[in-house]
Image (cartoon, grey):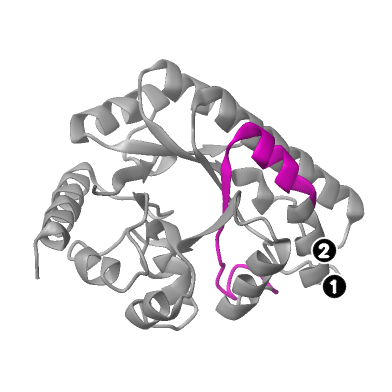
Amino acid sequence: MSPHLAYVEHNLPAQTPAERFELARAHGLALEVAHRDDDRARRAHDAGLEIVTLQAYRLHEFHPIHPDKKQRGEAYEHLRRTIELAAKLGVPRVIAVAGYGREICAEPFEEARAFFRWLAPIARENKVRVLIEPMSPLRCAALTAPMVLVRLLEEIESPDVYGSAIDTGHVIDSGREVDEYLERWPRVVEELQLKDKGSAPPDGEVPLAKWLRKLKALPEVVCVEHKLPIEPDELGKLVEHLRSELRVFAQPR
């Protein structure tokens, strides 16, 4: 079975949520929705869109390795709320980050390990998987080395609820080759996010089929994410290219 082909809702080139929902329908896309403690995910759900992932988006503001204990508590509550919302809406996974920005605590690995261990029962009770995404050193001052995050996932000791997602933009911004990174990543990648350098939209000829063949197993989701804008006609070309790459991947070699 092919992965779900999804797009981050707020990155679709339209002004309002309703217009973005229509774009998703027109292109046959599932959605990944950034949860900011708002109602956007519920609105997408009520509009009949398939939501495959929620982002615990406010972890960009306060995060598990923030130097302020109160901020770490805010991060815990936000991720808890995101997990519980995912369960209510029937969304099977949430993406989280272990840290963000330059302000970090004295023992980031230990704080991150404790943070995600505390949340494991919440994820387990709600039957939601939490995928931790490696960041580039441009986005976070700690826990960016691939093997450090692999170790973190191992030491959380909850493989039934925690897994990994890889964002190709963070790989590129780290100065690494995507092919090699994916091939060497020792865990199953449950979601592959496609982004180019500097949070640009992925290249219109992104070698998705080649990248998928580097992974240990086929991801559940392939999702486009970016901060720089994309034109509507370029969106259509990109989606068609990604679908063609998925067809290429599915063909016997």
User: Residue sitting at 74 percent across and 46 percent down?
Assistant: 119
Left or right of 11 on screen, residue 72: right
Q: Residue furthest top?
A: 46
Spot occupied by residue 7 in the image (x, y as percentages of width and height): 35, 44
Rendering quarter of residue 108: bottom right
Q: Is residue 225 above or below residue 84?
A: below
- In this view, the residue in front, 164 or 202, is 164
Q: Is residue 223 above or below residue 106?
A: above
**In this rendering, would 241 be left or right of 113?**
left
| Mark-to-mark CA distance, 1 and 2 | 6 Å
Given residues 183 and 157, the one toward you in this image is 157
Q: Secondary structure at mark 2?
A: helix
Please tell me which residue is depicted at 37% across the width and 49% down the height of the picture: 220
Tell me what residue is drawn at x 50 percent, y 28 percent: 41
- Visible residue check, residue 173: yes
Residue topped by disc 1: 107
Magenta residues? 118-142
Q: Amino acid at mark 2?
A: Glu
Image coordinates for residue 232, horizontal then vertical, percent? 22, 42
Which residue in the protein does label 2 denote?
111
Please state if 35 lies on the left or on the right of 229 as rendered.
Answer: right
From this viewpoint, is residue 9 visible?
A: no
| Magenta span contains residue 194 | no
Locate residue 4 relative to residue 169 in the image: left or right: left
- Seen in the picture, residue 114 relative to 55 is either above or below; the reply is below
Kindly check if marks 1 and 2 are in contact, taking CB atoms under 8 A apart as contact.
yes
- Residue 115, above or below 147: above
Q: Bin the neighbour count of mark 2 within 10 Å (Cα to Cα): few under 14, some 14-19, many 20 and up.
A: some
Q: Residue at x 76, y 62 (%)?
A: 112
